[in-house]
Image (cartoon, rainbow, N blue to C red):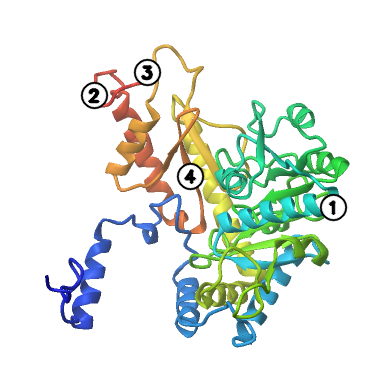
Amino acid sequence: MNDHVPPTGLPESGRPADDVLADLTAKRSHDVRWADGRTFALVFDGGEDVRAVAEEAARLYLHENALNTLAFPSLGSIQSEICGWTADLLHGPEAAGFLTSGGTESILCAVLAARDRAVAERGLTDPEIVLPVSAHAAFHKGAHMFGLRTRTVPVTDGWTTDLDAMADAVGPDTALVVTSAPQYPQGTVDPVPEVASMAAEVGASCHVDACMGGFVLPFAEMEGRTTPQWDFRVDGVTSISADLHKLGYAPKGVSVILHRSRELRRYQTFDFDGWLAGRYITPNMQGTRSGLPMAAAWAVMQYLGVDGYRRLVRTTLETADSIRAGVRAIDGLRILGDPVHHLLAMSADPEMDDTIRRIDLFALGEAMADRGWHLDRQGPPPSLHMTVSAGNAKAVDEFLADLSQATEHVRGGPTGEVTQYATLE
């Protein structure tokens, strides 16, 4: 047996760099065209100038490691400054936190901190998370990982948390109550003050998942698009997550997790001195942390400033408004709930005229994909989800034209002729 046979597929000798990079470029040929504004998920584009700043910052910090900020004090400074700027936006003068790799990690940290707080302060032995069915799946992942039970409550007809059901579910074993600003599936903002009050009454933590809205809602408010208070101005809110790599327009992956105070933040930190290599302290799920996304986020925030974010949010909201109006103008389609920011879900209208054939939303999604558009499919009910960003503005008219044509195609057009797509009964 030859012990020197390389792993299958790995070349015996290295290849020229130009050939390697050409292959990588070719691999991308079937990826979604996010730079053309044709993707309503996954990547959010602030424009060529924002990209250029982020890419240069990424090059400077390609190899740095935030595991030890004594070795890399610049990354300690970057983290502290980003958290401070975000705390200012979210009206948390005493708030403190850390950077994470994304919304899921921020949520996991919030769940862990809430559990440890409940154990330390209230002696809970069987802690629970109370959350609406609209809350992000990462909360269930956190409950699974950290040994909490989940109690889910329904949403109202307007797709916000059912407060009566929430009040019934919150109790002496509640460690964490979850609310969203906005929630992902339909883009509505939960009644945060009411939910936070319920959490405070039993001594539980209240986390606001603003992964999608943390870098939109503050600037939308500056632009005059107000929403009921949801951030640290609300008594009882103990932590907030906000993703810079979404509508903060930083590259993947960087998110902010903030706690109302340093005292609450300490429940997130892991501090261990029981092995042979000395004291080991980590503020989140990772050990080694790449400095690249941290530095790129810092550069983007500094480059844009408040005025730049207001401009991008203004464009985003105007684009989302145009899409909502365009969807509502198409017979047989509706927007779920009444979202007013950048998230929306379109579904079939159950109350349309009997002469109009109902639309199979997933067939519509396939028809739009055939036209080069990426929309996420979700349910229940069957719907197509969109996260609108400033990068979609350039393509909104083309999108609405294709959506109108694709809708007619999947239901057979004005004559009602049968097509290759099935329709819902």
Which amino acid type is shown beneath numbered disc 3?
A: Arg
User: Looking at the image, which residue is at 64% across and 80% down?
Assistant: 278
Q: Nearer the viewer, residue 84 or 316?
A: 84
In terms of sequence position, does the residue under pointer 3 or pointer 1 come before the other?
1
Which mark's residue is nearer the viewer, 1 or 4?
1
Q: Quadrant of residue 73?
A: bottom right
Residue that carries the numbered disc 2 in the rendered image: 419
Which mark's residue is nearer the viewer, 3 or 4?
4
Residue 82 location (% of width, % of height): 66, 72
Give the quadrant of the C terminus: top left
The answer to the question of whether label 1 and label 2 lie on touching residues, with beta carbons closer than 8 A, is no
In terms of sequence position, does the residue under pointer 4 or pointer 2 come before the other?
4
In terms of sequence position, does the residue under pointer 1 or pointer 2 come before the other?
1
State the separation of the CA atoms marked 3 and 4: 24 Å
In terms of sequence position, does the residue under pointer 2 or pointer 3 come before the other?
3
State the separation of the CA atoms marked 1 and 4: 41 Å
In terms of sequence position, does the residue under pointer 3 or pointer 4 come before the other?
3
Q: Is residue 221 left or right of residue 64?
A: right
In terms of sequence position, does the residue under pointer 1 or pointer 4 come before the other?
1
Residue that carries the numbered disc 4 in the rendered image: 386
User: Looking at the image, which residue is at 83% across and 49% down?
Assistant: 236
The kind of secondary structure element at disc 1 is helix
Residue that carries the numbered disc 3 in the rendered image: 357
Give the quadrant of the N terminus: bottom left
The kind of secondary structure element at disc 3 is loop
User: Looking at the image, which residue is at 50% across and 76% down?
Assistant: 292
Q: Is residue 225 visible?
A: no
Q: Residues within 10 Å of mark 1 (few under 14, many from 20)?
A: few
